[in-house]
Image (tube, helix red, strand yellow):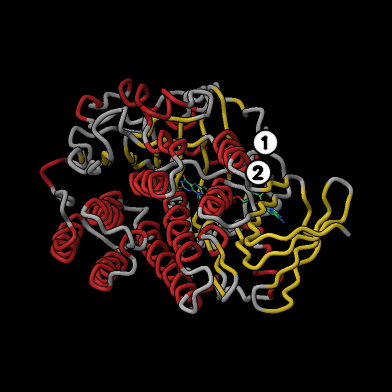
Amino acid sequence: MKEQKFDVVVLGSGFAGSLTAMILQRVGRRVALIDKTRHPRFVIGESSTPIANMVLRDLAKRYDLPRLLPLAKYGSWQETYPHVGCGLKRGFSYFGHKPGQVFTPSPTHANELLVAASSHDRDSDTQWLRADVDQWFCSEAAAIGVMVLEECTVREIQHAGLNDWSIDCQYEGQAISFHGSFLVDATGEAGVLPRSLGIASCVDRCRTHSRAVFSHFRGVGSWHDALNSLGGLTQDHPFHCDNAAQHHILDGAWLWMLRFNNGLTSAGLVLDEAKYPLDPSLDTFTEWNQWLARYPSLAAMFADAELATAPGRLLRTKRLQRRWSQLAGEDWALLPHTAGFVDPLHSTGIAHSLCGIERLVQILDQLWQDAARTKALAGYGKTLEKELDLIDELVAACFASFDNFDLLVVASMLYFAAATTYERLRCEGNTSLALLCADQDSVRSLLHDACAVISQHAHRSSDNTIDQVRRQVASLVAPINHVGLLDDSVSNMYRHTVAPM
Ligand SMILES: Cc1cc2nc3c(=O)[nH]c(=O)nc-3n(C[C@H](O)[C@H](O)[C@H](O)COP(=O)(O)OP(=O)(O)OC[C@H]3O[C@@H](n4cnc5c(N)ncnc54)[C@H](O)[C@@H]3O)c2cc1C
């Protein structure tokens, strides 16, 4: 068997594994990056956020990777890499639908919520067409010297002792063994390393219980145009509501829509499994069509849509949530999307991956052969746990509010309070924060209290009680409400929430 020796072996060459490999190579480690597939390949998880852009920008500067920098803003991305698939994302938009009814816009935007994340297209966030973006990251890693192995099958992982890993693979028809002193698992859902180490799942910790049906489409109609034709006051919107992570809130479910410049739209239904458990006897296509049929305004948007060539079919998941009970060891670490996942609501995934990468590469750069590394890696694992717990709590509060759009607006504000607090602290120079300030006990505890208030009132709220809930939650989160969230007077149109640049 052929043998090769590296400092770090990274399993999984999505953008997260590739970026980790690239940075570690940059700081002097010898890195191998192994993936079972070959780029370009379809993968879901596409909507970036201001936090993601801030971290990406800082990583590009800190590790002298200037070619990454243009990806941190829509304008520079378009100027520099127009061939890498992308969409414009000016913020988050939410629309509350009622089953069996055409969407009826209200003059006060009572069933709409728009939260701006940027004030201009050029500074805005992006939707990442992951087939292109991940290929770009992987080829950049190869260009700076990372040994990239695509279509490489991991047969066995052996851990002979501390800093002594062997990854036995099949590559180009040959058996090959990669030796590394540190192992990073970026295989996401596959969880190659935790499975190999026999780490137990702790998914029972997750309150959220959802599954998804999704794909890429061509020819999806514009929701902005649909709203206009239904008499909606789109002139009040702080941005074009299609240039967003668009959330359509349904009965016990939500539908995401993310549009790319090349005519593709990513769309997916996320269903509360408590209400809609997976019925294997119902085929995926029928299930998708049944949901559209219940919501005439959504069905109209998909009237001329067809599945895109990739992936060319609807994909249906089992429970989306997953969680491992140990997330790092003395000589190994899981990246965030391997460590666990909650739900696509509010697009936390890319930002979470980047925050985790930022912390991990710092440890492996500054403490590579230092006795303090073990403790730092344990801290890395603990912080990941706190982040996953907080995302789960915020998402679960939203799911509990799906049958009352006013309550959902209140619940969503908790995410925006945490996100904008993170953005502001980061701009003040605090670059060691956990995603959404999940490691700040004061922030964590007031978000926890606010989620508890929402959960208490979920499913049994009159207009009066929602007003009370809004006031109670507003008072609880006042210390982290820097951008005028939960303000009755703005009619759910938040334009002053833009991230500081
Ligand atoms: C339905 C859904 C919707 C989402 N939407 C959003 C969103 O809108 N915004 C957002 O920010 N996040 C979203 N996410 C989360 C987002 O997908 C992740 O944060 C992101 O994919 C993490 O990227 P990654 O590179 O870590 O992992 P992945 O993209 O999962 O890449 C894993 C890589 O590992 C490789 N691999 C797998 N098995 C093996 C093996 N045995 N050996 C070697 N390699 C292997 C795969 O081929 C792949 O290349 C969503 C997630 C889901 C499930």
Ligand 1 within 8 Å of the CB at mark 1: no
Residue at image position (43%, 57%) is 358
Element marked by disc 1: loop
Pinpoint residue 184: horizontal percent, then vertical percent: 60, 62
Residue at image position (19%, 60%) is 480
Pinpoint residue 172: horizontal percent, then vertical percent: 85, 45
Pointer 1 residue? 313
Pointer 2 residue? 284
Residue at image position (36%, 57%) is 398
Q: Amino acid at mark 1?
A: Arg
Q: Amino acid at mark 2?
A: Thr
Foreground label between 1 and 2: 1
Whether label 1 touches label 2, CB < 8 Å: yes
Element marked by disc 2: helix
Q: Nearer the viewer, residue 86 or 113?
A: 86
Pinpoint residue 402: horizontal percent, then vertical percent: 37, 53
Q: Nearer the viewer, residue 66 or 197?
A: 66
* Res 286 seen here: no
- Label 1 Cα neighbours within 10 Å, binned few <14 / some 14-19 / many ≥20: some
Answer with the quarter of the image where residue 68 lies: top left
Residue at image position (69%, 45%) is 283
Q: Nearer the viewer, residue 93 or 43?
A: 43
* Distance between the alpha carbons at the discs numbered 1 and 2: 9 Å
- Label 2 Cα neighbours within 10 Å, binned few <14 / some 14-19 / many ≥20: some
* Residue 27 marker: none
Pinpoint residue 38: horizontal percent, then vertical percent: 71, 40
Depicted 421 relative to depicted 201: above or below: above
300 to the left or right of 151:
left
Query: Along the polypeptide, which appears first: circle 1 or circle 2?
Result: 2
> Considering the image in quadrants, where does the C terminus appear?
top left
